[in-house]
Image: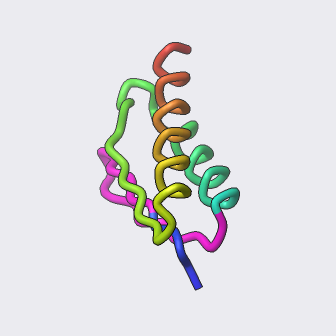
Amino acid sequence: MASIAIMIGTLQGTRLLAFSSEREAAIMTETILRKLDPLTLPVPFWVQCRDRAVGQRLTDYLAEVQAELLDA
């Protein structure tokens, strides 16, 4: 059962992802962000999770990934 949902807005449309672990969510979402055209960054994303601490960690991590990609 998925306990984490992440939605990413891209020029090609919205992607809705579901995960059962924080690690899986971080790895897969980072992979998607790294495959996007750098000129389209930053993209909006939303993290929904029952555990607020997990949701906040993922939000912070994915924001850092995008910041890193923008600086590259």
- Residue located farthest toward the top when viewing the structure as drawn: 71
**Which quadrant does the N terminus fall into?**
bottom right
**Which quadrant does the C terminus fall into?**
top right
Instruction: Tell whether 17 sits left or right of 44.
Output: right
| Residue 11 within the magenta-colored segment of the rendering | yes
Q: Measured from the top left, where is residue 53 in percent x and y?
A: 52, 55
Q: Measured from the top left, where is residue 11 in percent x and y?
A: 30, 45
At x 37%, y 31%, the residue is 42
Residue 48 position (above or below residue 34): below
Q: Main secondary structure of the magenta part?
A: strand
Magenta span of residues: 6-21
Q: Quarter-wise, where is residue 16 in the image?
A: bottom left
| Residue 7 within the magenta-colored segment of the rendering | yes
Instruction: Tell whether 14 sits left or right of 61.
Output: left
Q: Measured from the top left, where is residue 48 in percent x and y?
A: 41, 64
How many marks can you see?
0
Q: What scheme was used to colour the molecule?
A: rainbow
At x 69%, y 57%, the residue is 23
Residue 21 position (above or below residue 59): below
- Residue located farthest toward the bottom when viewing the structure as drawn: 1
Residue 66 position (above or below residue 11): above
- Camera-nearest residue between 68 and 47: 47
At x 38%, y 30%, the residue is 41
Q: Measured from the top left, where is residue 61 in percent x and y?
A: 55, 39
